Image (spheres, rainbow, N blue to C red):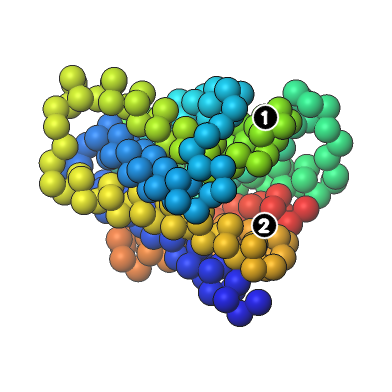
Amino acid sequence: MTIGFLFLLASLIGFGLLGILHKVADHPNCRPRIITMLLLFWGALLTGLYTAFFDAKGLHAPANVLWVGAAGGVLASLALFAFQASLRFGKISTSWLILNLCVSVPVVFSVVVYGEKVNAWKWVGVALVFTAIVLLWMDKKKDLQRGGDAKVNSADVSRTLRWLPLILLAFLANGMAATTQIVLVKMGGGDYVWQFYVILYAAGCAVMVLTTLVREGWPKRREFTTAAGMGIASVAGNIAMVKALACNVPGPVAYPVGNGGSLFLVVLAGVLLFKEHIHPVGIAGIAVGISAVLVLVLS
């Protein structure tokens, strides 16, 4: 069990580091399209190597797994690009939380599409998600005020108006990408999880290549190295979580620690490392948001 909890700690650090590196990539020398393309490239390469050498089925997968994975990749590429672009206008501490609140989308999808019965706690979690988003939006509105009755800065208004649609697009697209895992299981492809991830990363990368290189040109060194770190953190987090579960760490323990812990780590980094100011209403939104994730995962 001890080694399992070490894997769980590694997963927490991996996912938390991914969020922090997203903020590091919010730099004038890092273009969101290029960062998204390279992150997906590294994800495809690393999951491909892991699957080829450590999964009994190797890189072989049925056609339905390929199609579902490709759909997930298209949605994931849209989510990652919208999220990375949103950081130009918002805080990592609140934006990362909203992105992770997308765990509510598969819940609604399961009810609407598959008619699954959902317990009351799941609906409480969904309600907390929307409450958190409202509170975080109120925190963003507070940033428009320069104290007291100060006049609204037009540049800040523009940043807020650009941040909101981008982060909501990232929330929805990431949630829909997560629902492809449900579709995979419903179609009988639950034994091909790693093959599914290889296709997801590869398809997302292909989409970004087609929409990026002609317009943006070739990657810069900072973009290449930063995205490499993000890809390693993303894949390491996923592998460590699987290993933790394989070492008999209970799911009701693993997922809350992995999700909630990494969220807390990113929020803490936003405040301490990147000096982001969060209003009391934003702190309330973060607390409600983390609670929403925990409720949805635990129930």
Q: Nearer the viewer, mark 1 or mark 2?
A: 1
Report the residue that reaches farthest toward the bottom. Answer: 2
122 sits left or right of 106 in the view: right
Of 266 and 52, nearer the camera is 52
Percent position of residue 149, x then y: 38, 47
Indicate the secondary structure of the residue bearing disc 2: helix
Q: Residue at x 45, y 46 (%)?
A: 52
Disc number placed over residue 217 in the picture, else none: none
The image quadrant that residue 159 belongs to is: top left
Judging by the rendered image, the residue that carries numbered circle 1 is 183
Q: Can residue 248 be seen at all in this image of the molecule?
A: yes
Q: CA distance from mark 1 to mark 2?
A: 23 Å
Of 144 and 22, nearer the camera is 22
User: In what quadrant of the picture does the N terminus appear?
Assistant: bottom right
Q: Tell me which label, 1 or 2, sits earlier in the chain.
A: 1
What amino acid does circle 2 point to?
Leu
10 Å crowding of disc 1: few (<14), some (14-19), many (20+): some
Judging by the rendered image, the residue that carries numbered circle 2 is 294
Q: Residue at x 30, y 54 (%)?
A: 229
10 Å crowding of disc 2: few (<14), some (14-19), many (20+): some
Percent position of residue 6, x then y: 53, 74
Indicate the secondary structure of the residue bearing disc 1: helix
Percent position of residue 273, x then y: 31, 66
The image quadrant that residue 28 belongs to is: top left
